[in-house]
Every structure is written in C-alpha cells, then in structure tokens.
Amino acid sequence: MNVSPPCYGFIPARFASSRFPGKPLADILGKPMFWHVYTRAAQCPAFHSVTVATDDARIEKAARALDVPVVMTRADHSSGTDRIHEAAEILGVPDHAVVVNIQGDEPALAPQMLNELVAPFFAEPGLMATTLAHEIDAREAARPDRVKVVLSPKGDALYFSRAAIPYSEAQDALFWGHIGLYAFRMEALRAITKLPPSPLERRERLEQLRLLENGMNIRVVLTRFASRGVDRPEDIPHIIEMMRNEPHCVKR
C-alpha cells in the first residue's frame, strides 16, 4: 500500500538583491512580504510545515517576531534551490518526502496552486519533480522574461526556454507559460544540488534545465491560476491593488 509522502514547504528569503535590496521585508498592507507568502502557503493542507530559509539576521528576527518558522542558512548559496536543500537537511527531511520551493516574492500566491503542485506525488510514487504552467498568448510568449515550456503527451517537460516555443506563425497561437514553483522528492533535490550548472542552463539562464540535461523528468501541472512576482519596488503598488481586488490572482 502506498503511503502518502509528507510535504515540506520552504520560502527562500535573501536580503541581498541588485534590483530590490531587502525585498523579503518590503511592507505590503502592514506586513513584510515574506509573511504574506508564508500565510498563503500555510493554507495548503498537504504541508507538514512551511519554513522561511534565510541568510540574514534581520529577516530571521522579523520572522520570529511574527511567529513564522525560520532557519538560518549559509550566505554563499547561488540559488534558492541550494538554500532550501540546506534548510531541508537542517530539519532532517526524509528522502521520500516532498520539498516545495515557494518563491519568496509571490505575496499574491494562490494556495490552490500548491495543492496542484504536490498532488501528482500522491498518485505516482516514483515521481521526482513537478512544476506548474498556465496558458499564455503569443504576445506574452514573445517576452524573453516569460519562460515557456513544451510538454510530452504524458505531461512531462520536454524543454524550457525564453524563446517562444513551439514556433508558430499563427497570431492566435497559445503557449504554456512556466510558473516558477517547484516540488522535489528530497532524494532528487539532494542529487541536483550536487550537479554543476549544465550547458543549456547556462545558455538560457534557467536552472530547471539542469534536471532535463541530467535525465530527470519534471511533471508539469497545468493550472488556471497565474502569479505575479515582485521584482522591483515599483511593483509593490500593483501587487497591493491586485491583492485587494483579486486576492488569489485567478487568471481569467
């Protein structure tokens, strides 16, 4: 009989940022950004726990003041994936458990997205990694900062790219836009953090290509939800308006 794996959510929160220093502590409706992410993620019933993983004492102090679980990690991590791996090791997460990388700059996150992200692990014991995608139009797909994904008939990722893939001359063509939420089996997370950056990963500047280049499948869950991250301070007013008018950012 299959036993449902425990799921652990981690929110990497780094203070240093070239475009927005101190972003996790940015005030949104009276609370720091990381608090909004944590509060929404904690609504996912599949999670055993949700923890902020940071390298900064200011973020740690703010988290403890708000009763948000937090662990301190090293400051030399090159990615959020490396940071959550260290945090998961600190908490003693078992190999069969599912570890979820929850972007710390998504204060308008819909909790339902996390349910969708981890659901395949309960049905497929051998699954190693999942992510999300939703439908976008050709105009949005043309933007290099909007990552696209193409899928196999089974729903596994064939490739991720900043280019508009698959190619189409049709003006009304639809594409799958990648949403940067990931879930990994702990044993898979440990394995990928030991691998060096891959050639396609370096070329596209997309960390998930490291998995594909090393033969690890990523199941892509298609969702009706969209997300809106905070990249710069000027994004904050737009996020606040979105949260007030459409708390879960449903893509119409």
Image (cartoon, helix red, strand yellow):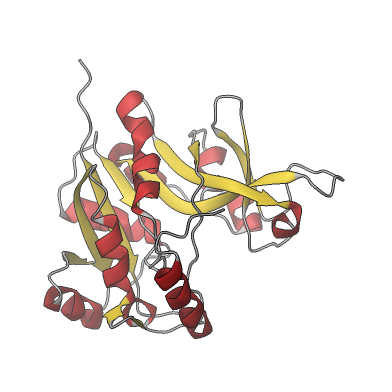
The relative height of residue 59 versus residue 48 in the rendered view (above or below) is below
Q: Residue furthest front?
A: 245
Left or right of 194: which side holds 198?
right
Q: Is residue 32 visible?
A: yes
**Could you say where residue 119 lies in the image, as x and y percent from the top left?**
35, 35
Nearer to the camera, 127 or 179: 179
Query: Is residue 169 or residue 157 the one in the foreground?
Result: 169
In the image, residue 94 above or below residue 72: above
Q: Residue at x 39, y 64 (%)?
A: 247
Residue at the right extreme?
Answer: 169
Q: Is residue 167 left or right of residue 70?
A: right
**Within the image, what quadrant is residue 94 found in?**
top left
Q: What number of labels is visible?
A: 0
Indicate the quadrant where residue 155 lies.
Answer: top right
Q: Taking the image as drawn, is residue 74 in sight?
A: no
Quarter of the image with the N terminus is top left
Residue at 49% across / 51% down in the picture? 225
From this view, report whether residue 34 is shown above or below residue 214. below
> For the point 71% across and 45% down, which residue is it?
174
Horizontally, is 53 left or right of 127 in the view?
A: left
- Residue 221 image position (x, y, % from top left): 48, 38
Q: Measured from the top left, where is residue 75 in percent x and y? A: 31, 72
Q: Position of residue 167 (x, y in %)?
A: 80, 44
